[in-house]
Amino acid sequence: MKIAILGYGRMGKTIERIAIERGHEIVYKTSEPINITELKKAEVAIDFSIPTAAFNNITTCFKENVPVICGTTGWLEKYDEAVSICKANNAAFIYGSNFSLGVNLFFELNNKLAKMMSKFNEYDVEVEEIHHTKKLDKPSGTAITLTKGILENTSKTDWKLIENQEKVDSKTIPVVAKREDEVPGTHTIKYSSEIDEIEIKHTAHSREGFALGAVIASEWIKNKNGVFTMKDVLDL
Ligand SMILES: NC(=O)C1=CN([C@@H]2O[C@H](COP(=O)(O)OP(=O)(O)OC[C@H]3O[C@@H](n4cnc5c(N)ncnc54)[C@H](OP(=O)(O)O)[C@@H]3O)[C@@H](O)[C@H]2O)C=CC1
Ligand SMILES: O=C(O)C1=N[C@H](C(=O)O)C[C@H](O)C1
């Protein structure tokens, strides 16, 4: 396939390598606003850019009828608007806060565990994410997806990013975001009672899984219209 890479940073470069290994051609790569003539050479665009650029990038692709895989996080307040523009243009779109197979399995496990734990009030839940110090957004998109999974499956009603070990009320999920040198991405869900703790954790060892998932999603979306998720791609 002919692929455009929007955002040629850490992820863009990893995606380029994996896409070429899988027989694809990178026809356009940029770290600047889109050049439409260049974009039109592509059969699919993969956006791993920055929070302030993602919405413009993906909606430009919708208008030019280039399917988009978007992994950029930190712009989700505009997700619903993006979906409307996608549908209005009969375009194709996948946003994923995390494209790795492991994390998408972890999302399912998190939902199931939350549902199970919802019957037991003696446990408090906490979400923690750790990422490298160059990450622009906080909490991570993955932590937000995990938190939404807990909200959908328990009686919790809200979440809050905790900066200084502050306490939250019993209806709110505390989300802790830590930044450490080169960490690619670690997410932990912890249920604690007076008696014990139950913890599930996903640790990414590199960016390979995110990039491979994004390339697989771009292969999957070919000849499709509509708004999809990695759950559709992986048939989970
Ligand atoms: N969904 C997932 O599985 C994953 C998502 N991510 C997310 O992907 C995004 C990118 O991460 P990462 O590669 O580590 O970040 P980087 O900072 O390494 O890369 C971002 C790139 O986007 C460029 N950029 C700036 N403005 C634009 C623009 N208008 N259009 C296109 N590109 C632009 C930056 O250029 P410059 O440096 O010149 O500003 C930079 O090269 C983040 O939001 C991150 O959270 C990361 C890993 C996995
Ligand atoms: O910025 C990153 O690096 C990552 N961002 C994504 C997120 O915000 O969840 C996915 C992954 O954890 C790495």
Image (tube, rainbow, N blue to C red):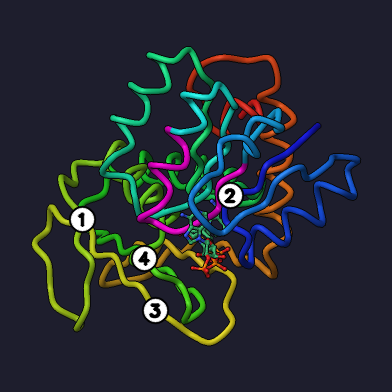
Distance CA(mark 1)–CA(mark 2): 31 Å
Q: Is mark 2 within 8 Å of ligand 1?
A: yes
Q: Is residue 73 above or below residue 192?
A: above
Seen at 84% across and 41% down, the residue is 25
Residue at the extreme left of the image, as rendered: 169
| Residue 53 in the image: above or below residue 227 | below
Hey, what amino acid is under mark 4? Answer: Asp
- Give x and y (percent) for residue 142: 45, 54
Circle 2 residue: 6
Kind of residue sitting beneath label 1: Trp
Q: Which residue in the structure is indicated by mark 4?
A: 137
Q: Which residue is mark 3?
A: 178
Q: Mark 1 vs mark 4: which is more N-terminal?
A: 4
The numbered mark, 4 or 3, whose residue comes first in the sequence reads 4
Q: Which region of the structure is painted magenta?
A: 46-59
Q: CA distance from mark 4 to mark 2?
A: 18 Å
The residue tagged 1 is 159
Observer-side mark, 2 or 3, equals: 2
Judged by depth in the image, the label closer to the viewer, 4 or 2, is: 2
Instruction: Say whether mark 1 is within 8 Å of ligand 2.
Output: no
